[in-house]
Amino acid sequence: MTFLAISILVGCLSVMTARQGNRPSGLPVARPRLVAAGGTYAGSRGQASDAYVVQERLVAAAHGTGGDPACAAAALALAAVVAARPQYEEELEECAQLAHRAVRTAALRDASAAGLVSTLDVVVLDPGERPCLRFAHVGNGAIWHCPKGAEPQPLTTSHAFDGGPRLRGLGLPSAPNPEVGAVPLRPGDRVVIVSDGAIRVLGAARMKELLTGGASPGACLDRLYDEMAAADPKDDATVIIADYVTA
């Protein structure tokens, strides 16, 4: 399982190709995209559980449990996402179902992986005539939309009671029932994916404070890491910060 997880994670480190048609030479090209910074702060338990993907128009994160390593479930889920390359809401829902089947199949085939379960948070940029972010969510992570100059707004709800088991998850016997939706975008808007581990160590209120103020995604992530280091979390904490740009 360890070799499988590493192989899939390496495969996830890809960049979505921007399709560009014929255009006059020398003219600037508008390229709507997500400029993102992401990372996982490794918990002191030393048990890798999180994985994430950053592409030009797609960002995603997952938190796995039940495998050895625990991130095997997360890697399986994200591999399904990358392979599907979803663009629309119905595709995002099907993508979550594909990820669920990938994790569930692995759990059923290998007795040592019977407890594989993963969360999933996916955001896709739709740069059409009315640009928007499309998202899918399963589990106890979170996706926030940060309109330029405004307070971060949650786009998802946690599929778990405080401190309790997940009510929904990829790989569980029950259907994942992903939460899907879309939100309009303006240049300068920001979207953030955070794992439950990140929320628990810093708190949602403090994280929202750190995400505002006009700093770049990379600078925001550095500030978050500094505070995580001071808190010394036991579990992995993953954050992806992505700004919508058009130039």
Image (spheres, helix red, strand yellow):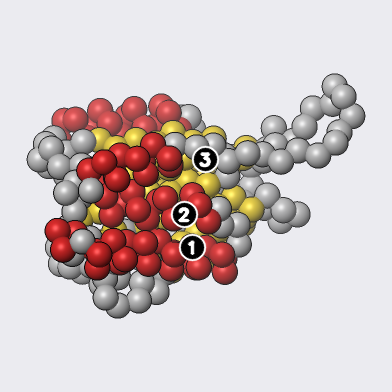
Q: Which residue is mark 1?
A: 95
Q: Split into 4 quadrants, where in the image is the C terminus?
A: top right
Secondary element under disc 1, as helix, strand or loop, is helix
Question: Residue at image x 25%, y 35%?
Answer: 41
View extreme (left): residue = 45
Side of 128 where 158 appears, left or right: left
| Residue 229 position in % (x across, y down) | 19, 30
Q: Which is closer to the viewer, label 3 or label 1?
A: 1
Q: Residue at x 79, y 27 (%)?
A: 28
The residue to which callout 2 is attached is 81
The tag earlier along the polypeptide, 2 or 1, is: 2
Q: Which residue in the rendered view is the most extreme toward the right?
A: 24
* Among numbered discs 2 and 3, the one appearing first in the sequence: 3
Question: Helix or strand or loop: what does disc 3 sit on?
Answer: loop
Query: Mark 3 belongs to which amino acid?
Result: Gln
Q: Nearer the viewer, residue 16 or 168?
A: 16
Q: Position of residue 246 (x, y in %)?
A: 68, 38
- Alpha-carbon span between mark 2 and mark 3: 12 Å
Q: Secondary structure at mark 2?
A: helix
Q: Of label 3 and label 1, which has the lower sequence position?
A: 3
Residue 162 visible within the image = no
Q: Residue at x 87, y 24 (%)?
A: 25
| Residue type, label 1 | Cys
Return the residue at label 3.
Answer: 55
Q: Amino acid under label 2?
A: Val
